[in-house]
Amino acid sequence: MESERSRAHQPANRSANQAESAYWKEGVLYQLYPPSFKDSDGDGWGDLGGILQKVDYLAELGVSAVWIGPVCDSPMEDNGYDIRDYYKIHEDYGTMEQMEELIAKLHEHDIKLIMDLVINHTSDEHPWFEASRSSTDNPYRDYYIWKAPAEDGGPPNNWRSFSEESAWEFDERTSEYYLHIFDKKQPDLNWNNEDMRRDIYKMITFWLDKGADGFRLDAINMISKDPAFPDAPEDARHPRGQQFYKNGPGIHELLRELHDETFGRYPGTLTLGEAPTVTMDEVVRYTAPERREMDMVLQMELIRLGKDFGNPWKTDPGWSPVTLKESVVRWHKEVFGKGAYALYLNTHDHPRMVGTLFGGREGGEDERKELNDAAAKAIGTFLHTLPGTPLVYQGEELGMPNANYRSPGDYRDKATVATYKRRTTEGEKAEDVLGSLHARSRDGARSPMHWTGGEQAGFTSGSPWIPLNPEGRGANAEDERGDRSSVFHHYRRLIALRKESPVPARGDLTMLPLEDEWVFAYVREAEGERWLVLVNFSDEERQCPVHAEWAHLAETGELLLGSAPAHGGTSGAGAPFRLSGGDYVLHLLPYQSAIYRIGQ
């Protein structure tokens, strides 16, 4: 039976949806990773009860929408991204009644709820897959992708999974292989099967009727596979074969049908697609309003800063923030105003930038925290003043550093654990492997949220499912909410500025030419208002020549937000320009940043 909400708007056109969804253009999204956010019952695992306790905190921060990771029933082989029952809340998270209460409470504070929708694959314990693997003639057989062995009895092709193993798993019951782009416990759904698609649409409608305001579409550009399933070159980029299932031949038709049968019937529903490895043209095709596919995609280039693409466990020794500048300029030029995207610099799937690429890594605890806080403010200033919608990951607004675990037993991520075992078995020194895990494992971002500076950081009264960060306890919500100079209040002001001015959401972008690759200066302009943004991404003082025009505009303009110097020096947040030999020099202290409203 169709809901009243659905029947009243059939089918809604895309432009109407986007007009009602201005919050995702002009507001800020907040990613909440449920296992690590807040535990309410002392079992060490974050839950819906804990999220309910912290809705007031989210409202105080000022975010417009909260994206929560998957909370549906799951065997938890991949922390919920392996769904066993789409219609049931996992018992460790709570109950359906709590989910309904959370939606209602968020709405009371004018905060939208964005659910994580995992529809490229399911758990191998999902009833569909259990039926599918039971026989070749079962009605659910084609809900998944099955292939006969190759002539030599091996996998149908040479594709590799994200786990660095074959993307095919042999099932003895029917003597065929099934495809799993991710773990073998996560078989890929067959989106060419119409019955499967109809069941997916029914499930999505269930959650829309519950009051969900939108969905982050996990791995959504992988649902259409090349029907020939060809072999990939042996030296193809990890994971091998991705060119044959990312942005596949039927992807746009599938997304339009998905929209028309579900999201398009519920005006205001946000769709945010995780679509790795896309060209600018593909982003526009995915998100142009008239195409009725998705509202936004996640811009995944910034988050990969410092990554060595030849080795996922290695940091590129030659990385520099120049890649950030190049990416920002390219996306603005080729996508902004045509399609839409969300930007993020931290997430549950990548190590935090503070404590790995930026911040204090040497010296005493106080000195490290001072640099970490300055780096967090610089990162926040950059993120919130770029074209695109900012996405803040839990703890980022506190300046939480990446967890520096000291023992292999502290890690929980399956790929991380397997990598440590393999590399040490092959003869690498344990301390060297641990160093690379700290720099690249996603578990570093999954350490529990710091609510207080007390026992278990206020996350739980029991033992946390993953150890707390052994460092950085000073970055906690209780202390920072009471300190007007904290990272938390810096983020609050950034979020408020986005709501007060048209510049962040709609402004054009002009990068100013500077000789120092670690210093960014750019202008955003919309509706007669201009901002000048300055950011030092270095842990050292930086200075470089700057045109006198921009120095005068800043000096006569209004300082909207500035970060205090990271440590001693004469240049304050509001006075970064100096005259030297008759020329102006921009002089910024470590991780200093500033936003000015300037004249024309």
Image: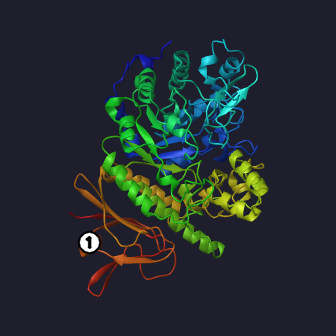
Query: In terms of image quadrants, where is residue 122?
Result: top right
Depth check, front residue: 497 or 387: 387
Residue 265's x, y, as percent?
41, 22
Place of residue 149 in the rendered image (x, y in percent of width and height, measured from the top left):
67, 26
Q: In the orientation shown, which residue stands out farthest toward the bottom?
A: 581
Please give the name of the residue rendered at 41% of the width and 53% of the height, measured from the top-left corner. 496
Residue tagged 1 = 556
Q: Nearer the viewer, residue 442 or 96?
A: 442
**With respect to residue 464, does 49 lie above or below?**
above
95 relative to 377 in the view: left or right: right
Q: Position of residue 583 (x, y in %)?
A: 27, 82
Residue name at image x 69 percent, y 29 percent? 152
**Vertical placement of residue 458 versus 17, above or below:** below
Of the pair 583 and 564, the residue shown nearer to us: 583
Q: Going 38% across and 52% down the picture, which residue do you hit?
A: 498
Q: Give, as a three-letter code, the residue at label 1.
A: Thr
Across and down, in percent, residue 563 comes to 45, 68
In the figure, is residue 501 to the left or right of 258? left
Instruction: Label 1, secondary structure: give it.
Output: helix
Above or below, 159 against 208 in this view is below
Which quadrant holds the C terminus? Answer: bottom left
Answer whether residue 477 is visible to the viewer in this image: yes
- The colour style of the image is rainbow
Q: Is residue 245 in view?
A: no
> Is residue 478 placed above or below 81 in the rendered structure?
below
Displayed quadrant of residue 364: bottom right
Crowd rating for badge 1 (residues with CA inside 10 Å; few <14, some 14–19, many 20+): few
